Image: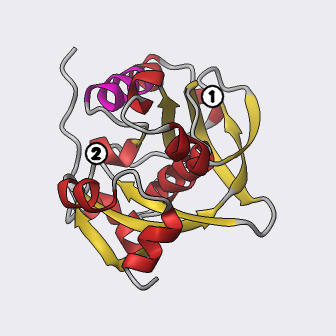
Amino acid sequence: MTSPPIVQTGAPGLRSRAKEVAPEQIQTKEMQDLVTTMIATMRAAPGVGLAAPQIGVPLRVIVLEDREDLLKGLTAEERRERERAAFPTRVFFNPVLKPVGEDRAMFFEGCLSVKGFVGLVERSAEVEVSGLDENGAPQTWRVRGWPARILQHEVDHLDGTLYIDRMKTRSFATAEHAKALYGGKPIAEIRRMLDL
């Protein structure tokens, strides 16, 4: 299967609120094919999440996963600080997100729709998401750390928001520069370097 192109920033579809999917539509071939395509596209990119609007489909559907092979470039300290661990593929139709507690965390984020760039984004450290799974069954997932960040990033896409709307603009950089300048450094040191 050929993955569809990932829509890039500037495309109007990335700036609109996506539409809910009727629960009775979830098990149709069309929706099941959409989920399969989204997962394949996310993996091919490679990325840790994808929202349907990123492939030009204006529906409230997200997929996410974090695989061990995507973590191999991180030090043990970076994994610990980001609370990042591998988790299996999750699919949410019509996700509703709630922050849990007051804890916030700031880290670099990139986006498959803003290719080649990253910026520091502050987000809730813990969230709870509810919605329907790929079979149309209700599900709730409460997570903290990197999975919580991915969820917030992807749900933002469904509302027409990109990470660049939330980032600390001083930190905006090419992924290459960010890695060279900040790779392996604790977030507190990076914030000092950028006066944040």
Between the residue at mark 2 and the residue at mark 1, the CA separation in whole angstroms equals 22 Å
Q: Residue visible at 54% across and 44% down? A: 77
Q: Residue visible at 36% across and 34% down? A: 73
Residue 43 is a magenta residue: yes
Is 44 above or below relative to 119? above
| Circle 2 or circle 1, nearest the eye | 2
Residue 185 rendering spot, x and y as whole percentages: 42, 58
Q: What's the mark number on residue 24? A: 1
Residue 163 rendering spot, x and y as whole percentages: 40, 64
Instruction: State the residue position of label 2.
Output: 56
Which is the main secondary structure of the residues drawn in magenta?
helix
Residue 62 rendering spot, x and y as whole percentages: 50, 40
Type of amino acid under label 1: Glu
What residue range appears in magenta?
A: 34-44
Is 32 above or below relative to 169? above
Q: Residue reaching furthest right?
A: 101
Q: Quadrant of the N terminus?
A: top left
Q: Residue visible at 42% across and 69% down? A: 190
Whether residue 162 is visible to the viewer of this picture, yes or no, is no
